[in-house]
Amino acid sequence: MGIFGALTTSVAGLRSQSYALENISGNIANSQTTAFKRIDTSFLDLIPDTGNTTQLAGSVTANSRETNSVQGSVQAASVATYMAINGDGFFAVQKPGSFTDNLPVFDGVDRYTRRGDFTLDKSGFLVNGAGYYLEGIPIDPTTGNVTGSTPKVLKFSNDFLPSQPTTAVTYRANLANYPLTTKHDTSVPGSELLKPADFTAGHDPTVAGTGKVIGSDVQAFIDESISGGAVTAYDVSGSPVSLQFRWAKTDSSTLGGAHTDTWN
């Protein structure tokens, strides 16, 4: 191998390492770019085609290797319309070819990206930071099932939806056989029960449909009942209303006779 061949091989190695450094620099520069995927470098040995009695130096070249199929890290965001794909898959998007009356005119070509920093623009489209418009498959509003299989550019109306009051609540609870109320005393039979006599006359809270707890009886009610958790309902104007549940045992089979375990 002559001097020229040695220099050529050395320069090829330097060029390949320089190319790898360029990829590394690009990865560092884009480390905070949304949905950016790093570029790896593959080195390829070049073996000269020579005879048995001739020796020539080999060489090396470098190529970029994409990592589009590699899962990136998913980070939390404060913007409600930001999205990320966990696993395989891409967002279907379109790019407008032109604008007419400030509205995009799409070219009809489906493209794919994993960049999910979508925000609503003034026209109701979801657009990511690279200027691509999100597509989706329409859903039947009645059945909730998808209609068709061809994605379309999504556009949302700015109209306010009418508020719907809560009309039903599904609630389940596990009740202890012996409630540990503030007033309970295991040495006194029936001390764990709610006692109508402790409430103002005419305001028995155990009377179905009409029973209520007035201000002066609130503490007695809390002392003789246990918490049943809470749920959030909504009134006709759409405002949230917290429903606080409390359970009270009003009779116990341990008292004998005609007594039965009864809860209100």
Image (cartoon, rainbow, N blue to C red):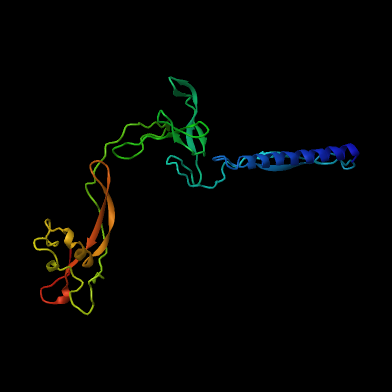
Depth check: 234 or 152 in front?
234
The residue located at (18%, 59%) in the rendering is: 215
The N terminus sits in image quarter: top right
Q: Quadrant for residue 55, please give it.
A: top right
Name the residue nearer the viewer: 89 or 83.
83
Which quarter shows the C terminus?
Answer: bottom left
Asked if residue 208 is positioned above or below residue 7 in the image, the reply reads below
The total of numbered circles placed on residues is: 0
Left or right: 137 as drawn, with respect to 59 = left
In this view of the protein, can residue 49 be seen by the observer? no
What residue is shown at x 10% (from left), y 73% (from top)? Answer: 258
Query: Residue 38: percent from the left, percent from the top?
Result: 61, 42
Judged left or right of residue 209, residue 171 is right
Residue extending furthest toward the left: 202
Q: Residue at x 63, y 40 (%)?
A: 29
Q: Is residue 264 left or right of residue 56?
A: left
Q: Residue furthest top?
A: 100
Is residue 264 shown above or below 168? below
Q: From what the image shows, is residue 229 above or below residue 43?
A: below
For the question of whether residue 83 can be seen, the reply is: yes
Residue 190 sits in quarter: bottom left
Q: Position of residue 174 (x, y in %)?
A: 27, 64
Residue at point 26%, 62% (across, down): 227
Q: Which residue sits furthest front?
A: 216
Above or below for 242 versus 189: above
